[in-house]
Image: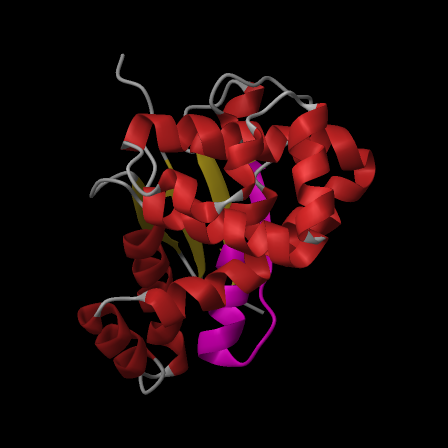
Amino acid sequence: MSKPGFSSRVLRRFVETAAEQLGAEQFAAILALSKLPAIWSKPETFLQVDAVESAKAYAQVQAAMRMHFGRGARGVLTRIGQRLWHRLLDDAAFTGKAQAAVIRRLPLNVRRKSTLELLARFIAAQPGDITIHTLDLDLLLADHVSPTTDGYREGSPICFVTQSLVRESLLWSTGQEQDVDEISCKTLGDNACEFKITTGK
């Protein structure tokens, strides 16, 4: 079974955002407490890192933050995910920016799925790593790789960054808060991390 992959570009933006949100000193201290390399606090460290190593680092940094903050980790990682969406949007290539501009002119009922497809394009290492499905009036984003979970087993879902990326991207495109629930997680032994977006009222 192949190891999960993750975009080093997204990893760099994640590290950048975490250091900004927590403060560089606190972020470095969290890495140190988890015996992770101090150099990981610098986004440029990951410029030449391959997809497998990027996935491993992404999972380890989030695990360090969950351990450090305990129950408060969800709120911290959610805020990082919200800000990360805007960094990824600003950082997008021309085609991504063009797609984003088109999305905000689409009818609302089409805009949500198109937004999730754009998000998947931004954060998936390979096509098919993340898929979008229609469930009657609702939507489902399925992360089949979910590097956050690699090597971890927990009693509840842990993909707070992905969940907040989904929520923030939909708020950006629709101007409306969306109900986003992680209904399955690989840390629980599920085959994918799945996020249900409730759009029907």
The verdict on residue 41 being magenta is no
Would residue 9 be seen by someone viewing this image from the given angle? yes
Q: 19 or 130: which is nearer to us?
A: 19
Q: Is residue 198 left or right of residue 88?
A: right
Q: Report x, y in % for residue 22.
A: 70, 52
Hey, which quadrant is residue 6 in on the image? top left
Residue 64: image quadrant is top right
Q: Position of residue 79 (x, y in %)?
A: 66, 57
Which stretch appears magenta? 164-183
Q: Is residue 4 left or right of residue 174?
A: left
Tally the numbered discs.
0
Q: Nearer the viewer, residue 47 or 3?
A: 47
Q: Is residue 101 above or below residue 71?
A: below
Q: Is residue 149 above or below residue 127?
A: above
Toward the viewer: 38 or 183?
38
Q: Position of residue 67 (x, y in %)?
A: 73, 28
When asked about the image quadrant of residue 52, the answer is top left
Residue sitting at x 40%, y 62%: 88
Residue drawn 69% across the image and 22% down it: 155
| Residue 192 visible here | no
Quarter of the rendering occupied by the N terminus: top left
Q: Position of residue 74 (x, y in %)?
A: 71, 44
Residue sitting at 24 percent across and 74 percent down?
99
